[in-house]
Image (spheres, grey):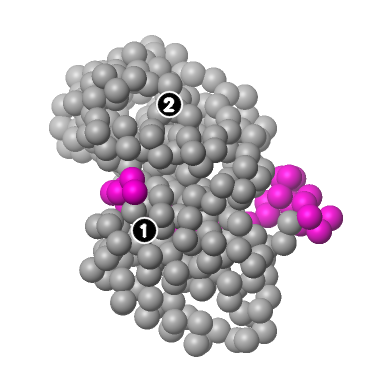
Amino acid sequence: MKYTQPVYRPPYEANTLLLQVTVGCAHNKCTFCTMYRDVKFQVEKIDQVEKDLQEAQQLYGNVKRVFLVNGDAFVLSAKRLKEIAEKVHHYLPEVEKITMYSSINNIKHKSDEELAELAKLGIGDLWIGVETGHGEALKYLNKGSSIEDAYEPLERLNKAGITFFYGFMFGAAGKGKGIENAEANAKLINKVKPLGIVPTTLSPNEGTQLAKDIADGTFELATERELFEEQKKTIELVDVPTYYMGIHIINSVSFDAELPKGKQGAIDRVNHAISNTNEAILDSVPERHSI
């Protein structure tokens, strides 16, 4: 099967068949990200997609889930996604869910009727990198959309029957604004009711605008203590049924929890991490190597 490096997928899709339908990221301008910085965005030829599905049919049995790579495959038109989904079901008839990364803008460019049709074809569990519900922070991160833009598209997904995961970053608002960020994320989460919430932690990757801004003092990263407090506040404020999916290696304390049922247990885990972390580390900004 054809894969153009680099290829990324969520940790939770480790056992999912990866099918390349795009290369790189259509936006590729985020302040904090270098994942596809040197990769020219391209749409994979449909003949190649079909060839890969034929190979997958020969190699794997009983495939239930397919993840479309790369960076924001939901950028494809509804017509192209429908064509891909129909081919997936033709060659892999036991597939139940076709998932992928998405941005808010990818949703905005599809009609309600198109979204409903995609849902019927098994497209769902979209991994949406919202990154933050904090308007000022979102503007700085340069996602290409505002927080006002986020509510309607996410609610339209719910209306169409397309489940999604809300991806966000602890520390996205910077030093001294962790509680603000937690409150803003919880407000959006409680409104749009995602299937799961998926936190990572903001980190300065070399060559990003974020790294440059930290170096010249125009952006300050949150301390470890602030990140823990933001994590606790986010969990405390989320009141809708959802899954907290926090196992990303970059997070200071990694775990999964069912909310709101497991809220107190989750908060207790963070408190345990705080009490077992050296004070000097808590008041520092530990180096992180990945987004």
Q: Position of residue 280 (x, y in %)?
A: 67, 84
Which residue is rendered at x = 30% and y = 66% of the image?
A: 257
Q: Quadrant of the N terminus?
A: top left
Q: Is residue 223 above or below residue 52?
A: below
Check disc 1 and report its element: helix, strand or loop. strand
Task: Verify whether residue 197 appears in magenta.
Answer: yes
| Outermost residue, right side | 216
Which disc number belongs to residue 108?
2
Which residue is rendered at x = 68% and y = 51% of the image?
A: 205
Whole-number angstrom distance, CA of label 1 to CA of label 2:
25 Å
Image quarter of residue 49: top left
Q: Is residue 6 above or below residue 79?
A: below
Task: Verify whether residue 84 appears in magenta.
Answer: no
Image quarter of residue 139: top right
Q: Name the residue type under label 1.
A: Met
Q: Nearer the viewer, residue 186 or 9?
A: 186
How many numbered marks have been drawn onto this rendered protein structure? 2
Which residue is rendered at x = 24% and y = 30% of the image?
A: 160
Whether label 1 touches label 2, CB < 8 Å: no
Q: Name the residue type under label 2.
A: Lys
Q: Nearer the viewer, residue 134 or 74?
A: 134
Q: Earlier in the sequence, mark 1 or mark 2?
A: 2
In this picture, residue 27 sits left or right of residue 59: right
Q: Nearer the viewer, mark 1 or mark 2?
A: 2
Q: Which residues are magenta?
A: 191-218
Is residue 57 in view from this perspective? no
Check disc 2 and report its element: helix, strand or loop. helix
Image quarter of residue 173: bottom right
Residue assigned mark 1: 245
Q: Position of residue 196 (x, y in %)?
A: 32, 52
